[in-house]
Amino acid sequence: MLAYTFSLDAFPLLTMQTLDPGKSLIGQGVLSPSEFEQFEALIAFLPPMEALNTQEVLLVQADSSGVLERVYAPALFATEEGGIVLRVGANTWPVTPAKGYFHVGRLTGFLNVEMKENFRKEQYMLVSVNFSDEADTASFSIGVRILPESEVTQVQLQKLVAKGDSIAAHLMVVGKGGTGGTVMKMHELGIGEFRLVSVEQVEITKDGEQPRTSWILGVDSGDRVWAKSGIIVLLKDGGWIKSCVKLAKATMQDTKGGFLVDLAIPFTLKISKIEKAGDGFAVNCQILEREPRGVAALPSVSVGVAAIAPVTPQRQLVGNAPSGSFEDMPF
């Protein structure tokens, strides 16, 4: 049986390429034939798709010099309607849960849950589904994107699957920027241009301090980052948000601690410079009313940033790690 894990070790030649800084979707034409072969093997067992996008099958992250840092493997996500899908880059296939297993195309998968420990000695679940075909000619280790805020335990998750009940309520929602997942510091996103899809205003309370207003920016890679520097000045004024809503460039909905704005036309979050400053980082960033730049029609080394489901650091790709703390907040 051929076993495919889609881990960083599966892309040795990709480490030799210079990629776009930050996160981008790549595929055939960027990956070597041997590296793309694992996606071809997986797709061959999945239902035919008329609009299959082979140029965008793997989300990667590179540092400011274009050196590969992380790969984000195919994984299971929830849909807004409560279903489950397998996400392979820009492509999705519906997944059917059954008693004790999952089914997609000609593949049957069984849940695998491991308990891990991070550098802070905190326990977290590493969750995956091992899919294989009926003849056991190939197996694929597929991540399960558990919501970081979900309190589901290993035993509870296994019981849900054993009974054939859906685990969608505990999964990140596919392609939903600005909701779900942890919130990153902006320097963790990296230098580059990212399509801005949402702005969320929140009230943050720290022990012994007055509540503070902050903003969370959602980008189409699914990442959520704390607003910083000049962007805070823009959002604090409120005029830009009001103008976007008035001109139908955005829609706004109230939340418990503020509001959530979904942008209706292309805006770009541009991060141009990141420097170490004391115990933190100084970031040069701005919001621009245009598409992110650097997306080639026929990719050579990268196809730029494109819509994909929420992502988190490497150790959380196939599991649920502890959420951030107040030390992660932008003040």
Image (cartoon, rainbow, N blue to C red):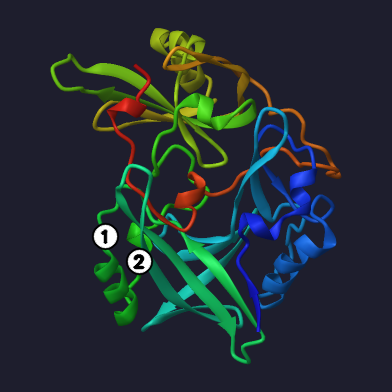
Residue 122: numbered disc: none
Mark 2, mark 1: which one is toward the viewer? 1
Tag 2 and tag 1, C-beta contact below 8 Å:
yes
- The location of residue 195, given as percent across then percent down, is 61, 32
Question: Alpha carbon of mark 2 to alpha carbon of mark 1: how far?
Answer: 10 Å
User: Quadrant of residue 216 in the image?
Assistant: top left
**Nearer to the camera, 122 or 145:** 122
Q: Is residue 263 visible?
A: no
- Report whether 73 appears left or right of 50: left
- Report whether 139 appears left or right of 263: right
Q: As displayed, is residue 32 above or below residue 189? A: below
Amino acid on which disc 2 is placed? Ile
Q: Which residue is mark 2?
A: 167
Q: Is residue 139 visible?
A: yes
Q: As displayed, is residue 265 above or below residue 142? A: above
Quarter that holds the C terminus: top left
Which structural element holds mark 2? loop
Amino acid on which disc 1 is placed? Val
Q: As displayed, is residue 58 above or below residue 167? A: above
